[in-house]
Image: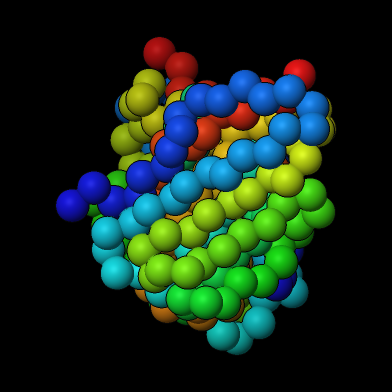
Amino acid sequence: NAGVTQTPKFRVLKTGQSMTLLCAQDMNHEYMYWYRQDPGMGLRLIHYSVGEGTTAKGEVPDGYNVSRLKKQNFLLGLESAAPSQTSVYFCASSRDNSPLHFGNGTRLTVT
Amino acid sequence: DAKTTQPTSMDCAEGRAANLPCNHSTISGNEYVYWYRQIHSQGPQYIIHGLKNNETNEMASLIITEDRKSSTLILPHATLRDTAVYYCIVRVAGGKLIFGQGTELSVKP
């Protein structure tokens, strides 16, 4: 039981490049979330999903897209990376009203 | 989602109880109070949650006032490893978790 796994752990992009962050969970959780955390700040919700095939916007969705084609995976895409998207990205999953389980984060730098 | 207010920082002596307050005056009847902590840049760690009644687990106790407008997280015997940022969050059942700025707790020898 690996819990929540995020790949990659680190990535450096140039402005304008695209990439996809993968989140996988093996706990059969319905709900999945993507957060970003900037230095010295709390976590901010980007997008979330309440089930396979459904997604919804969070607090800071601009510049990101998500997909939940399989229940166990939640993908976060950056179509054209900008320096403002330099951050640590955390994925989380949960059942209906259970605590969220977080991954260890992806550290992204956009130059 | 109801918002929460926490002190920016607190200090606690090692071995003493750490009492972390949180105000959530606009909480609704179906919103739970959750506490998480984050050590360095690791993913947030779940501590405890509750709706109306006080709760206790192996990590901490959660005291919720009768009117549910505030709560206190209690770490009974703080250690240096409890130094972290602590987040108080209210959440509708099955809903999203919105983090605030949290309280930076420093446990000192």
For the point 40% across and 13% down, the residue is B109
- Relative height, residue A27 to residue A51 (above, below): above
Residue A87 seen in render: yes
Q: Position of residue B79 (x, y in %)?
A: 34, 26
Q: Position of residue B54 (x, y in %)?
A: 40, 69
Which residue is the extreme one toward the bottom? B29
- Relative height, residue B23 to residue A107 (above, below): below
Q: Judge from the rendering whether residue B62 lies leftward or rightward of residue B21; answer left or right.
A: left
Q: Judge from the rendering whether residue B49 lies leftward or rightward of residue A55; answer left or right.
A: left
Visual colour scheme? rainbow
For the point 63% across and 49% down, the residue is A77
Q: Position of residue B106 (x, y in %)?
A: 52, 24
Which residue is the extreme one toward the front? A17
Which residue is the extreme one toward the top? B109
Residue B91 seen in render: no
For the point 38% across and 53% down, the residue is A24
Q: Using the image as rendered, state which of residue A84 and residue A43 is in the foreground.
A: A84
User: Residue A27 lies in what quarter of the image?
Assistant: bottom left
Q: Using the image as rendered, state which of residue B30 and residue A24 is in the foreground.
A: A24
Q: Judge from the rendering whether residue A95 lies leftward or rightward of residue B72; answer left or right.
A: left
Q: Quadrant of the C terminus of chain A?
A: top right
Q: Using the image as rendered, state which of residue B58 and residue A93 is in the foreground.
A: A93
Q: Position of residue A84 (x, y in %)?
A: 81, 32
